[in-house]
Image (spheres, rainbow, N blue to C red):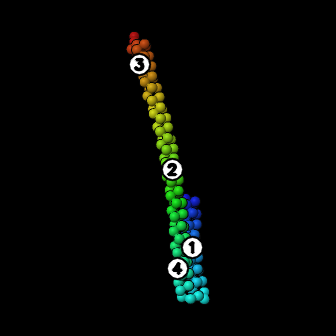
């Protein structure tokens, strides 16, 4: 997990804890407010609905961000793979070119050696009295 993803994950976790804390705080505040049972139940239902709505909104935001990060990471991975393939292909081409040049140099040297052996003729023994 990259540094940015970790930071976003931490931010998402903090936001989730904040929403949960705000909801719990609202419920506690409502419980200690001097209201009738009916008003208290309505306020609790409203606070619960708002908390659920906030949680859903936070979840969809985090999901959208995760999708964006996934798309960005996939695109970056594709770029890196393409670059790696290109580097490997270039090195392969260089290796092939070097190998071909080596073969050609060997053939040229072999022909030169065979030509000089033919033009010089067979070797004669020296010092034959």
Label 3's element? helix
Q: Nearer the viewer, residue 125 or 9?
A: 9
| CA–CA distance in space, label 3 to label 2 | 58 Å
Disc 2 packing (10 Å; few <14; some 14–19; many ≥20) = few
| CA–CA distance in space, label 4 to label 2 | 45 Å
**Could you say where residue 26 lies in the image, as x and y percent from the top left?**
58, 80
Q: Nearer the viewer, mark 3 or mark 4?
A: 4
**Could you say where residue 53 lies in the image, as x and y percent from the top left?**
53, 71
The quarter of the displayed image where residue 122 is located: top left
| CA–CA distance in space, label 4 to label 1 | 16 Å
Residue drawn at the location 59% of the way across and 88% of the way down: 35
Pointers 4 and 1 in contact (C-beta within 8 Å): no
Disc 4 packing (10 Å; few <14; some 14–19; many ≥20) = few
Lower position in the chain sequence, tag 2 or tag 1: 1
Q: Is residue 127 above or below residue 97?
A: above
Label 1's element? helix
Let me know if residue 67 appears in the view: yes
Lower position in the chain sequence, tag 4 or tag 2: 4
> According to the image, label 2 marks what residue?
75
Q: Is residue 78 above or below residue 97?
A: below
> According to the image, label 3 marks what residue?
114
Residue drawn at the location 57% of the way across and 63% of the way down: 8
Q: Tag on residue 19?
A: 1
Q: Nearer the viewer, mark 4 or mark 2?
A: 4
Q: Nearer the viewer, residue 67 or 129?
A: 67
């Amino acid at each position: 997990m990259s540094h940015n993803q970790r930071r976003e994950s931490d931010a998402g976790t903090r936001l989730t804890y904040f929403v949960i804390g705000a909801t719990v705080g609202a419920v506690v505040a409502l419980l200690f407010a001097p209201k009738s049972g009916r008003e208290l139940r309505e306020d609790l239902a409203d606070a619960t609905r708002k908390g659920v709505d906030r949680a859903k909104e936070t979840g969809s935001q985090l999901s959208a961000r995760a999708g964006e990060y996934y798309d960005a990471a996939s695109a970056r991975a594709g770029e890196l793979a393409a670059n790696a393939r290109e580097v490997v292909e270039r090195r392969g081409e260089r290796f092939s070119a070097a190998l071909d040049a080596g073969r050609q140099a060997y053939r040229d040297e072999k022909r030169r050696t065979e030509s000089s052996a033919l033009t010089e003729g067979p070797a004669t023994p020296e010092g034959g009295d």
